Amino acid sequence: MKKKYVFADLFSGCGGLSLGLALAGLRGRFAIERDSMAFRTFAANLLDRPGAATRFDWPDWLEKKAWDIEQLLDLHLPDLVELRGTIDVLAGGPPCQGFSFAGRRNEDDPRNLLFKRYVEMVEALQPQALVIENVPGMRVAHARRNVVDIQPPDPAGRKVSFYDKLVESLSVAGYHVDAMLVNSSEFGVPQKRSRLIAIGVRKDLCKWLDGGILRAFKLLEEERIEQLDFLALAPVVTASDAISDLETAASPLVDCIDPESPKHFMEVRYGGPKTPYQKLMHDSHEGPMDSMRLARHTDEVRGRFAQILKECRRGVRMDDASRQTYGLKKHRIYPMSGSEPAPTVTTLPDDILHYVEPRILTVREYARLQSFPDWFTFRGKYTTGGKRRTKECPRYTQVGNAVPPLLARAIGNALARLLDEVSSAQRDAAKPLARPALAMG
């Protein structure tokens, strides 16, 4: 019988990585997320939903609530150490905002130092394998000179990135780590989302792998190809493939009755999936879909968006001249192209314009572009602003921060195969050598 590997998820957000690992057949033990809205979404789908009992074996000593990783380590370190030997994969990386090229890179962002607590969790649990998803900027050294010294300065005076420091810390903890830049659109996700996938394997296990730690990325590539075939997805899933069934032009609008939304918003009455991707996302869902609320644009805003869609190049960010022409102050605005994958979904809903309709996207459309299935529901506010933006994680932010579940599914399958290979090699090495037969005279 094939072993069912167990994972724990740190900095889990709303659950994209956990969902993908569960879809790959891994079983969860626990997940840590500090934001209450994001954890409400996580719990609603992966803990409380009918059938979700098969996804997690939650420890009795850990309250099912939003936890800060520092608080968890302070209060439950002995309990975590007791779990050694039961966690095969420790998933999840520290928040990426301090590394992202989409915003202002800040080496002093306190979120960048959370990986120190991540390393403490690794040391406590000592899993067989690690997986960390982060933005490509994590591997680039910051330009300013006052980088926080987490490890001793490089002897040669070389400026190192936070990724380099994390790798060094995990090496000291007993892990070989390597990383690969991955584009989610190659895994069936209808979005050009490049992310750094770092995978670590305990050093005592790495020696059993053909090619060492690099074997993980060869298996990930094999799983990418097999996933597209198994799910019957095209090599490229376009934005139109993903969300054309959610357009407003051919569907009646109805009142949005979401209890967490103010009144007087509208949403589309869903008419059913049209493309293979839409059918895959809508599989097993019944009834109205969650988070379909449409934005309330003024006539002026809709007119401006219509002009942008008519006159500006699709699928690329508007340049400075174009933004000045339309009186736009935002730095990042993408008019989508329906014939290619969407640009990277961010935490700000007004970063992306719909490819044919003069409006921003709904949370559900965001979720489709991230490969969340339609049964996956979201909790909390839709959006927030001002100073609350750095303290709250509303629905758009939850989706924008998530690991695409289809990418996570492929990672989970690759890690399961990798651990299978380690176990198989260890068993073969333990078999006694066959004695040569005696010659018959």
Image (cartoon, rainbow, N blue to C red):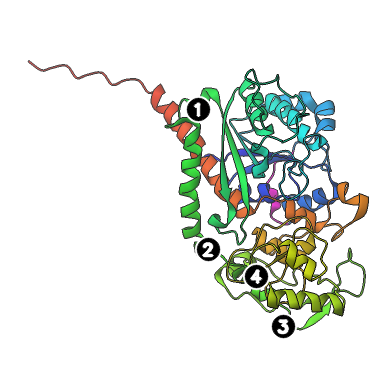
- Residue type at mark 1 is Cys
Residue tagged 2: 236
Mark 2 → mark 3, Cα distance in angstroms: 25 Å
Disc 2 to disc 1: CB gap under 8 Å: no
Residue tagged 4: 313
Residue tagged 1: 206
Q: Secondary structure at mark 1?
A: helix
Mark 3 or 4: in front is 4
Mark 2 or mark 4, which is nearer the start of the sequence? 2
Disc 3 to disc 4: CB gap under 8 Å: no
Mark 4 or 2: in front is 4
Answer yes or no: is residue 350 visible: yes
146 relative to 435 in the view: left or right = right
- Residue type at mark 4 is Arg
- Residue type at mark 2 is Val
Q: State yes or no: residue 134 in magenta.
A: no
Q: Is residue 242 above or below residue 405?
A: below
Q: Position of residue 245 (x, y in %)?
A: 66, 75
Q: Residue at x 86, y 80 (%)?
A: 299
Q: Residue at x 64, y 17 (%)?
A: 155
- Crowd tier of the residue under label 2, counting other residues whose Cα lies within 10 Å: few below 14, some 14–19, many 20 or above: some
Q: Is residue 190 above or below residue 275?
A: above
- Residue type at mark 3 is Ala
Taking depth in this image into account, of 172 and 346 the one nearest to the observer is 346
Residue tagged 3: 249
The numbered disc on residue 351 is: none
Mark 1 or mark 4, which is nearer the start of the sequence? 1
Q: Position of residue 388 (x, y in %)?
A: 91, 50
Mark 1 or mark 2, which is nearer the start of the sequence? 1
Q: Position of residue 136 (x, y in %)?
A: 64, 43
